[in-house]
Amino acid sequence: MKNKAGLIIVCCLLFSSCSLYQKYEAKETVPANIMGDVRQTGDTLSLGADTLSLGAIGWRQMFTDPLLQALIEKALQNNADMQQALLTVQQAQNDLQSARLGWLPVFLFEPTGSLSRFNGATTRSYEIPLTYNWQAGIFGQVTTKQRLAKARRQQVDDYRQAVQTALCSNVASTYYRLVMLDRTLQILQETQTVWEESLEAMRVLYEAGLYMSPAVHQMEASLATVKSGIVEVQETIATTEATLCLLLSEPPHAIERSPHGTFAMPSQLQVGVPLRLLSARPDVRQAARDMEIAYYETLQTRQAFYPDIVLSGSVGWSNGEGLVNPAQFLSKAVASMTQPVFQQGKLRAKHKNAKINQEKARLQFVQTLLTAGNEVYQQMRICHKTEQKAVYLTTTVNALHEAYVGTSELMKNGTNTFVEVLKAQEDLLTAQITEVENHYEGIQAFINLYTALGGF
């Protein structure tokens, strides 16, 4: 009767432990409208297939400028943050390899010796055993440790991709900022040349008595403002180059770059269906890994309620109590089972807290997903806005240039005053710089979109 009762208890334990072997399965779904309404009729915004989305292509296909590609390659090789991320991946891989060996027993070589003296007699004894210890893990303890280590290894790899994506984006953003500053400097220098010629003409006309001195002074002030802007831009270029060199882990030096206007926005921006956010964006994947890790940690707290069965023993040689000097073979085997009975409610508290951590991980995943969709939506809107503005700004620049030329001709004929010409020049300069800044804003939004979609 006792044997039957024991058999029933064992069967119940084994049956209830089946759920302790269950592998984690993601249950969270991605809302169809997670990225908002980015479909626009007749423009470049669209939701395309996953295989055609920006999140599905690497940085080499995204940033096609050869000079920029060389800089990104150098940054990936030298940047300290990137190297630390790679080392972290190696550490996680080592932990995973160790967890995969969890089913194997532990062997220890533990030789001991003693020397004692009593009533003038000396006793020498020794043992040279090889001990072993093996955790059976019949309730899934070892399997859960292995799966937990694997999830952490994958999460660290997601972290590495996040560092790589951020590094590529920062290098590209800084590079195109330098290109924008080059164009701004060029505009200011061209403006300086034209305005210096205008000032010289003004002085000639002033000496001839055709202009009042206030007009000359006003022109001198405007020219000085342009020269001050040139100095400011040159200084910004130097500091921006230093920033880029820091990303490359190099001392400050000049950066070779392509001329303004070589960057071309893709004819159609496809972000992919919402599932792409899960499979490509590192922070979303990391949040998903957090849910998986929390699941296995909860499973471990459940497994702590079940007995832990350990087989141990030793084999080797010993001279007994020292009475027999030649070595004799020694062997021992022990099986033990540890079943928690009462631990002041600690196991139950750990289990409850682990379930709370699971819910916290789920909430964080949902929030990360919403943040990702929001970022994609915003950057898509900026890309769309800058593209629309570019058409109008180009028209504005062309119109103001014609206005400046016409005003200058009228001034030569004595119809307009120099103040009107100066106003036309200043309006043209402002419009040209605004056009350059809008172009850079579009490039920056495109780079941010690449990051928001988890580019690699």
Image: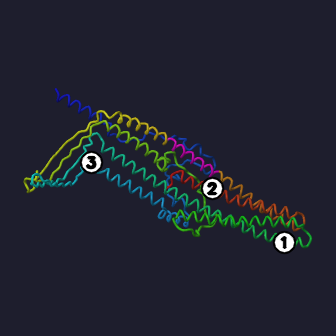
| Residue 197 placement (x, y as % from top left) | 80, 71
Q: Counting residues from the N terminus, which is met first, the one under dot 1 or under dot 3?
A: 3
Structural distance between the alpha carbons of marks 1 and 3 = 91 Å
Task: Judge left or right: residue 177 versus residue 26.
Answer: right
User: Was residue 380 drawn as part of the magenta stretch in this picture?
Assistant: yes
Magenta span main SS: helix
Q: Tell me the residue at 33%/46% (across/down).
A: 145
Q: Nearer the viewer, mark 1 or mark 3?
A: 3
| Nearer the observer, 143 or 439 | 143
Residue 103 image label: 3
| Residue 97 placement (x, y as % from top left) | 33, 53
Q: Counting residues from the N terminus, which is met first, the one under dot 2 or under dot 1?
A: 1
Structural distance between the alpha carbons of marks 3 and 2 = 55 Å
| Nearer the observer, 403 or 436 | 436
| Residue 188 placement (x, y as % from top left) | 72, 66
Residue 201 image label: 1
**Res 124 visible:** yes
Q: Nearer the viewer, mark 3 or mark 2?
A: 3
Name the kind of residue labelled 3 in the image: Trp
Kind of element beneath mark 3: loop
Q: Which residue is mark 2?
A: 442
Check if mark 1's residue and mark 3's residue have beta carbons within 8 Å.
Answer: no
Q: Tell me the residue at 76%/70% (across/down).
A: 193
